[in-house]
Amino acid sequence: MIKGVIFDLDGTLLDSVTDIMNSLNKILGKYDYELKNYQEVRSYLGNGAQKLVERSIPSEKDREVLNRIVSEYNDYYKKNSNIDTKPYDGIMELLEYLKNHNYKTAITSNKIQEGVTSLNNDTFKGLIDVAIGERVGLKLKPNPDMIYLALKELNLNADEVLYVGDTEVDLLTAQNAKLKSIAVTWGFRDYEVLADLNPNYIVNEPKEIINILKEV
Ligand SMILES: O=C(O)COP(=O)(O)O
């Protein structure tokens, strides 16, 4: 019996590309790197800030320089993560449905923990039970460790939850943790990319997740 839902954050619950792009470009511009457009940033997301920066400036191989840019990006983003960021249409209704029907919920995100915590508090205001982001000592998705931690904090087993995400990173994470997966098409990857990864379900709108929960 399904008792909980674990969500990815960026591209699944939140449309966050514009704030991420603006923070990234602020730092890239400071060091005279070429700025990135919306579609480029969307395609670079999924594996956290380090990969976002590496994918944005592939010619930069100096680790120290890369680390400095990641750190400045994270510092700037922490203060500017909730300007244009908003839940996708239908997400608040879905989360309210889950709360009202006693499903437990978690976020597992490759975004830094501070960003996850503040966006979760400001936007979802108690609708989500557990919010896990990039932390020292915790491996990023697609490693299943974030899922294991979420399951522990929710006090649920793998076969009692569904995982909802929007990228190959998420679907691989679900596979690695042996969770049933739902791929969403409103996020950072297109339908064809997601379909090739064989998720258990693919949905075009959040309310379809309610129908899946009624079926399983
Ligand atoms: O920061 C990223 O690259 C992606 O974050 P997410 O795991 O919430 O999608």
Image (cartoon, rainbow, N blue to C red):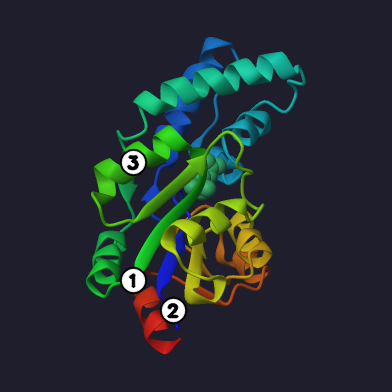
Percent x, y of residue 162? 49, 71
Provide residue 158's location: percent of width, then percent of height: 55, 70
Q: Give the residue at x 35% y 24%.
A: 79
Residue 61 placement, left or right of 50: right
Disc ID at residue 197 = none
Question: Gap between marks 3 and 1, in whole Å?
Answer: 21 Å
Q: Secondary structure at mark 3?
A: helix
Q: Are marks 1 and 2 in contact (CB under 8 Å)?
A: yes
Residue corresponding to mark 2? 2
Which quarter of the figure is the N terminus placed in?
bottom left
Using the image as rendered, state which of residue 126 and residue 202 is in the foreground. Answer: 126
180 lies above or below 57? below
Q: Residues within 10 Å of mark 1 (few under 14, many from 20)?
A: some
Q: Which residue is mark 1?
A: 103
Amino acid under label 1?
A: Tyr
Residue ranking furthest to the bottom: 215
Q: Is 22 displayed left or right of 39 in the figure?
A: left
Mark closest to the chain's N terminus, 3 or 2: 2
CB of residue at label 2: within 8 Å of ligand 1? Answer: no
Q: Is residue 39 shown to the viewer in this render?
A: no
Tag 2: amino acid: Ile
Mark on residue 119? 3
| On screen, residue 13 above or below 17 | below
Q: Earlier in the sequence, mark 1 or mark 2?
A: 2
For the point 52% across and 15% down, which residue is it?
Answer: 29
Indicate the position of residue 10 as horizontal and vertical percent values: 45, 48
The residue under the point 52% across, 34% down is 37
Q: Amino acid at mark 3?
A: Leu
Q: Residue at x 61, y 43 (%)?
A: 47
